[in-house]
């Protein structure tokens, strides 16, 4: 993360820039100061030297006596000696500007100096100085001049001026190393403090960087990361506060995840379909039940509009109504041969507005209702016929048949038959309801099929003979025993053979057969009852196991229509199944299978 936008660089640059500006300013100021001090020193020294030389008695007396002409050898020698001693230019000028002697050049060649600034100042104020380019030496020179006074000052005007001159280069020569030292010091200090500023910036920025990295990890779901606060300062406090916040967030996220998980388990497993739509009716959530009811896949419908998902204008209509009325709306509709109850409930305010659509499958409930209704109407119908004939018989008896004993006997026989039929029906109904409700526990034990088949067949043999029907039993070898409650399964055989006798005309044959069909039923034995009777129309075939169902009410008078229903329930209670095949006019075959006893469990 070496971006110059980073906190570390911004702090470091700010510090460094500030330090550099201060250091440059300080260096410039100091070099000036050094120069000023050095020049002042030179000036003071020059002034002291000039005053000393100007007070020279020989010079003064010579001037008083006007002993020398310009360029006088004696004076020039003196001045030159002074100049050599001081390593400076020494000039003696008369008050009127005439140069008397000069250590550097011949005074004769020099022009009049009366208008030189330092000379004028020296004569007027006692000290004169000037920095200017000298044509004599062709250099920038610093001049200082003092008046040469008569021996007794009270005597009057200055006699002349003594001037000392030094090239500025010499003046500045002493300054340069000092200035260099100041500049070098400044640069070193600037470098060091800049480095320090980087170090400080890094110290400030590092915890912020670490916080950022931990926060980034948290945003990616890694909640385990924490920072250890190593400092007591504000950064330490920030880290501690951050850790506390992370702790609480982790708890809350965990809690929310848990809640969400529970909610999704409920939604996944509930029988009702649930959809959440957004304000525009796009599916935001759909549970598996809803997807099943609408024949869509849960993955494919996200953000797809409800009309496209429901594909039925009546369902969409309910949602639209709730959208307009802002109230829950519901409807019960038949969709794809299913009875669906749909409830659409608006929730939330814009922009979080949405709709909760619930789909309930009432098909099974409706079917049960129909079955119950059919059952009641069937049973009333079944009771009405024998009761009506009983009433007729009783009335006939009362109206005089009692007086005719042989007729009365006949009527009583018929009454007995009707009552027996009623009693049997009630008996069968009770039986059915007990088997259906599982209130008759099966006493399952390994039973050979012969034990199940032979007894009911023997019992029905006389009846078959009376009807001139041949009854054959064919027990195939190698069929293992079945797990069965023998008495119950015998009842199944009885019902089937009894039906076959009833529906087979004289001369027909009924075959009861036991067999194995390992390729179809590897763990079961099959029992079938075939007849050569009237058969069952294919339209009726699927319904004959229903309660009270009779193919031809007129033909099967006397039957209750419960026998096959009872048989089916008994077989199913044995984990088996029963079915019928038939060709009308040629005969029927009823078959059922029962689990065989497994020898190697
Ligand atoms: P039921 O007491 O009337 O015999 P079942 O439940 O035993 O009642 O039979 C239902 C109907 O199935 C009967 O009314 C009859 O029409 C038809 N059925 C049953 N077995 C046979 C068969 N072997 N041949 C032809 N029809 C049959």
Image (cartoon, rainbow, N blue to C red):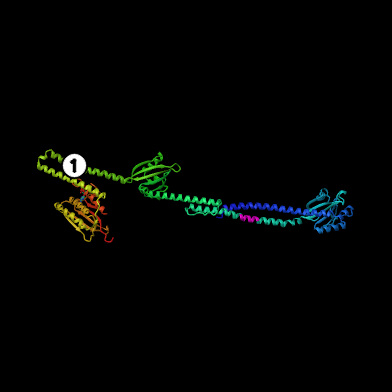
Name the image quarter holding residue 278. Answer: top left
Q: Any magenta on residue 192? A: yes
In the image, is 390 to the left or to the right of 35?
A: left
Q: State whether residue 360 is above or below residue 165.
A: above
Identify the residue at image location x=15%, y=40%: 394
Q: Quadrant of the N terminus?
A: bottom right
Secondary structure beneath dot 1 equals helix
Identify the residue at image location x=47%, y=51%: 250
Q: State whether residue 584 is above or below residue 84.
A: above
Q: State whether residue 175 is above or below residue 281.
A: below
Is residue 172 something that shows in the picture?
A: yes
Q: Which residue is mark 1?
A: 387
Q: Any magenta on residue 318? A: no
Find the magenta span and give its range.
Answer: 189-196
Percent of width and height locating residue 576? 26, 54
Of all residues shown, which one is farthest toward the top? Answer: 399
In the image, is 439 to the left or to the right of 313?
A: left
């Amino acid at each position: 993360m070496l971006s110059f936008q980073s906190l570390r660089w911004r702090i470091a640059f700010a510090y460094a820039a500030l330090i550099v500006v201060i250091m440059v300013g300080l260096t410039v100021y100091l070099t000036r100061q050094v120069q000023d001090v050095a020049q002042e020193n030179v000036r003071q020294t020059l002034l002291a030297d000039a005053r000393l030389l100007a007070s020279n008695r020989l010079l003064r007396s010579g001037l008083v006596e006007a002993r020398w002409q310009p360029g006088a050898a004696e004076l020039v020698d003196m001045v030159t000696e002074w100049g050599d001693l001081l390593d400076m230019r020494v000039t003696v000028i008369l008050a009127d500007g005439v140069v008397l002697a000069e250590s550097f050049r011949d005074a004769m060649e020099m022009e009049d100096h009366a208008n030189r600034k330092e000379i004028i100042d020296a004569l007027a104020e006692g000290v004169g100085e000037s920095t200017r380019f000298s044509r004599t030496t062709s250099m920038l020179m610093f001049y200082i001049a003092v008046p040469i006074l008569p021996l007794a000052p009270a005597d009057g005007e200055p006699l002349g001026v003594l001037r000392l001159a030094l090239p500025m280069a010499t003046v500045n020569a002493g300054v340069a190393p000092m200035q260099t030292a100041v500049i070098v010091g400044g640069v070193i200090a600037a470098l060091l403090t800049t480095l320090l500023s980087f170090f400080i910036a890094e110290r400030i920025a590092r915890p912020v960087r670490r916080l950022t990295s931990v926060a980034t990890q948290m945003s990616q779901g890694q909640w385990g990361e924490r920072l250890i606060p190593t400092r007591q300062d504000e950064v330490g406090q920030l880290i501690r506060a951050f850790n506390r916040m992370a702790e609480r967030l982790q708890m809350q996220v965990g809690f929310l995840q848990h809640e969400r998980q529970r909610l999704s388990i409920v939604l996944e497993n509930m029988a009702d379909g649930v959809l959440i739509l957004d304000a525009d009716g796009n599916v935001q959530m759909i549970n598996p039940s809803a997807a099943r009811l609408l024949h869509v896949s849960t993955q494919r419908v996200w953000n797809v509009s409800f009309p496209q998902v429901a594909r039925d204008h009546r369902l969409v209509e309910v949602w639209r109504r709730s959208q307009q009325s802002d109230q829950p709306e519901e409807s019960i509709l038949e969709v794809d041969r299913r009875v669906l109850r749909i409830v659409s409930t608006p929730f939330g305010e814009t922009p979080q507005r949405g709709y909760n659509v619930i789909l309930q499958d009432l098909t099974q409930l409706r079917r049960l209702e129909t079955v119950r209704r059919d059952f009641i109407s069937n049973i009333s119908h079944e009771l009405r016929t024998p009761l009506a004939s009983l009433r007729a018989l009783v009335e006939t008896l009362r109206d005089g048949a009692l007086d005719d004993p042989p007729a009365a006997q006949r009527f009583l026989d018929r009454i007995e038959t009707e009552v027996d039929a009623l009693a049997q029906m009630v008996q069968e109904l009770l039986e059915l309801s007990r088997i259906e409700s599982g209130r008759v526990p099966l006493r399952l034990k390994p039973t050979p099929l012969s034990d199940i088949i032979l007894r009911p067949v023997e019992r029905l043999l006389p009846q078959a003979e009376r009807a001139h029907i041949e009854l054959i039993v064919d027990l195939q070898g190698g069929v293992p025993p079945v797990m069965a409650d023998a008495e119950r399964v015998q009842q199944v055989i009885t019902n089937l053979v009894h039906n076959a006798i009833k529906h087979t005309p004289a001369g027909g044959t009924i075959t009861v057969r036991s067999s194995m069909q390992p390729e179809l039923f590897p763990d079961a034995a099959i029992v079938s009852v075939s007849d050569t009777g009237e058969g069952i129309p294919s339209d009726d075939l699927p319904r004959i196991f229903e309660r009270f169902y009779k193919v031809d009410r007129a033909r099967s008078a006397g039957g209750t229509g419960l026998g096959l229903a009872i048989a089916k329930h008994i077989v199913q209670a044995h984990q088996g199944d029963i079915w019928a095949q038939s060709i009308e006019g040629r005969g029927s075959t009823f078959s059922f299978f029962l689990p065989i006893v497994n020898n190697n469990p």
